Amino acid sequence: MTATRARTALAGLWDRYSATDPGLLRLMAGLRTVGSIGLALLVLSSMNTAVTQLVAGAMAAMVSTFAIRDKRVRDQAVTLALALPAALASVSLGALLNPHIVIGDIFFILLIFSAAYARRFGDRGTALGLICFQIYFLSLFVHARPSDLPGLCLTLVIAFASSALMRFALVPETPESTLKRLGQAFRARTAQLISTHIELLKAEPERLDGAVADLRRDTARLHESALMIQGRLEEGAPDEASADLLQRRIAAAEIAVERLGLLALSIRSVGRADTLTLHLPGVPLEVAERRIGDEDDAVRQLRRELRALRRLVARLADHEQTASARQLRNRLLGYRDEENVPRASPPVQDAFRGVGEAARAVLGLRIAVDGPGDESDDTPETVRSREEFEAEDLAMTAEEAPASRTGLERRTTRAAFQVTVGSAMAVIGGEFLSSQRWYWAVLTCWVVFLNTSSTAEILVKGYRRLIGTVTGVAAGVLLAGAVGRHTVTAFALVLVLIFAMFFTAPVSYALMSFFVTAMLGLLYTLLHTYSLSVLELRIEETALGAACGFIAAVLILPVRTDQHTDEQLVTVLSRLRDVSGAAVAQLSGGPAVDLVDMARELDTALDNLRRSTSPLTYSITPLRDRRRTARYLVALLETAAYHARALAATAELVPYSKSVAADPRLAAVGERIAHNLDVLIEHVEDGKATAELRIGPSIASMLEGSGSAQVRSGSVTFRVLRHLQRLDEGVVALRRPLGAALADEARPATAAKAS
């Protein structure tokens, strides 16, 4: 019994960790890099190699491991094989040109341009350029001379071999294993979000704000996991059909569980909760008074069923479902039948129906991963769900759109010129600060241009690197003093810091810079060149490199933050128009299209916009009004994207579902939403545009006014109408932050609605 509880506790702890590190990508990157360095150091130390070559081997093993980002194993092997001769050439040129300052500096600048320009050729070009740059930097760091070349070349060969051994044998990285781990993270985050739903339902009024904040955070984490899975499906799935099927099941599960959160919010609020509450911190939630009697019993039952749903999600890891798990599944699926929904207020009843839909999504995900399973004890509702999935699978068609590289080529060309000019300035300024350590300024200038697209992003990244460097210097002083001349201890701490560096890199760039600088203090100790003045110089060179990068970004082919953000915003609005238009057209009886892929493109565009606006929402920005506007705009778009995804998921059921029928009357609504989105796009592209948005009567009243029966709350039709209404309202709400106007004929209706 104790052993069972211990295993359960460990499994729960592992699930919580998996939720914080989707796919264990950070853990595996850290282990793989540290393992490569450790293996290289072990081999080199057994050969009685000098400390200088040990440091070079550690740096080469590190860069040869983290630089290669190809997804397929074969592509990784090809890139690594090409990288070794490139690295040997780079270190040889570095050693030969080191004595010739001017020629060496000119060559370094040309190398920087070539490495940045090579990013246009995808993962392989990026990796080769990065390795050439870092290995040349390595030759500067260890002050390589022509006489050192035989030993350095052997060190590089050992380092690359160690990297290959870790990558392909000891800690292998395959698309299939990564996708499997991402699936486990999605399961863990789904269970975590359901736990948050339970906490929200039982939170005291004074703690409700914290519960809503947890709901907002966990919903965003689940969406992040879904996006990561979608990005790995093409390489990780066995075939295109399996990838398409899994993508649809993941999207359906995400929408179903996210909707449960909204339904839980509606139970705790006066009236139905606004979807914006999920995406914008600070949106007030008017708490409903505590209900008594049957309502309390229904909410307690709802919490029990949510706990049951959480267990069902947790058991997705089991390839074979037990009899108890199947009974649990059948019971939860029963809430899709109106006869099984308990008597309660409409929001609570909707939540029970949401539990049934979430159980259906879990069943679909299990079928996609493990097959149909045991069907011997299926209930009628389970049979109905399976039939719906089978019909959906038969109706699926695969479409493939060619990727465009024009934008990538423009960005890499611009970045190549910018980083080259910035690096030239850093070389000149760095030489004035120190003729021995000037390359730190160049390195900082180089890294601030990695994965940045606008001047504000470069400024924020440079600031974070400087903060991490300043604090890292303090840590480096303490570590260097504690280690002294103990080489083994110093290298062991270097490995720990490198693991921490790679583990924290996706989370905090400032924290990563902290670990890098602390590690440098130890490396200088190993090279017997440590002094407090060296670490102070590190801060000065870092500040200089960040400033040179920012100046180059402002002066050379600048991309203003507003311009870059507007481009991303137009892309999001266009994708939103495409998804919503196609979904409404299919709900109106139009031809079937691949809505899941369109929704994925919308999510990707929205994620890019979120990153491009991050400098505007940074905590230290002095432009408070712009920060509030940017956060509000992104929250409105996230809300609209949620409703568009939900409409797309429902529209995909139209061709074969018995519960979802097309209604031609919805076409007019789709035309109005598309018109309004076109107007918003025009206003973003041209601030002087005069086109105006249109609004009309509520969508439900349009249908009820045409002689149709009253739409029942909780039905699929009701959900479709509600998503359409919220999408329509969200698109119109975008007019305020974007400065668009309403048409004259719409204003009286708006005033009447406000009154």
Image (cartoon, rainbow, N blue to C red):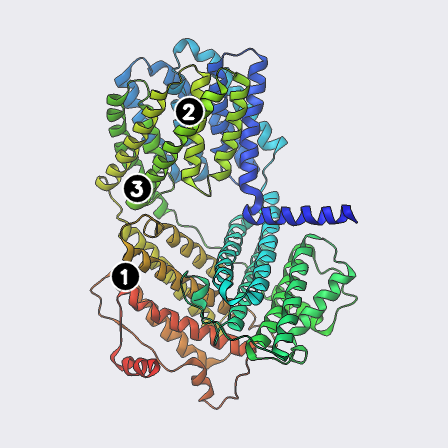
The residue that label 1 is drawn on is: 684
Q: Give the secondary structure at mark 1.
A: helix
Q: Quadrant of the C terminus?
A: bottom left
Closer to the eye: label 2 or 3: 2
Q: Quadrant of residue 41?
A: top right
Find residue 77 and name its label: none
Q: CA distance from mark 2 to mark 3?
A: 27 Å
Closer to the eye: label 1 or 2: 2
Residue 343 vs 726, above or below: the answer is below
Q: Amino acid at mark 1?
A: Val
Q: Give the secondary structure at mark 3.
A: helix
x and y percentages locating residue 657 in the rendered image: 60, 74
User: Within 10 angstroms of label 2, few (less than 14), some, or many (20 or more) residues?
Assistant: some
Q: Nearer the viewer, residue 674 or 472?
A: 472
Q: Nearer the viewer, residue 742 or 538?
A: 538
Q: Given contact means CB atoms under 8 Å apart, are the residues at marks 2 and 3 in contact? A: no
Residue 705 vs 455, above or below: the answer is below
Disc on the earlier residue, 3 or 1: 3
Residue at image coords 53%, 29%: 496
Residue at image coords 44%, 13%: 149
Q: Quadrant of residue 712?
A: bottom right
Q: Nearer the viewer, residue 637 or 89?
A: 637
The residue that label 2 is drawn on is: 477
Closer to the eye: label 3 or 1: 3
106 with respect to 719 (left or right): left
Disc on the earlier residue, 2 or 3: 3
Find residue 459 and name its label: 3
Residue at image coords 26%, 64%: 683
Residue with the most extreme top position? 147
Q: Given contact means CB atoms under 8 Å apart, are the residues at marks 3 and 1 in contact? A: no
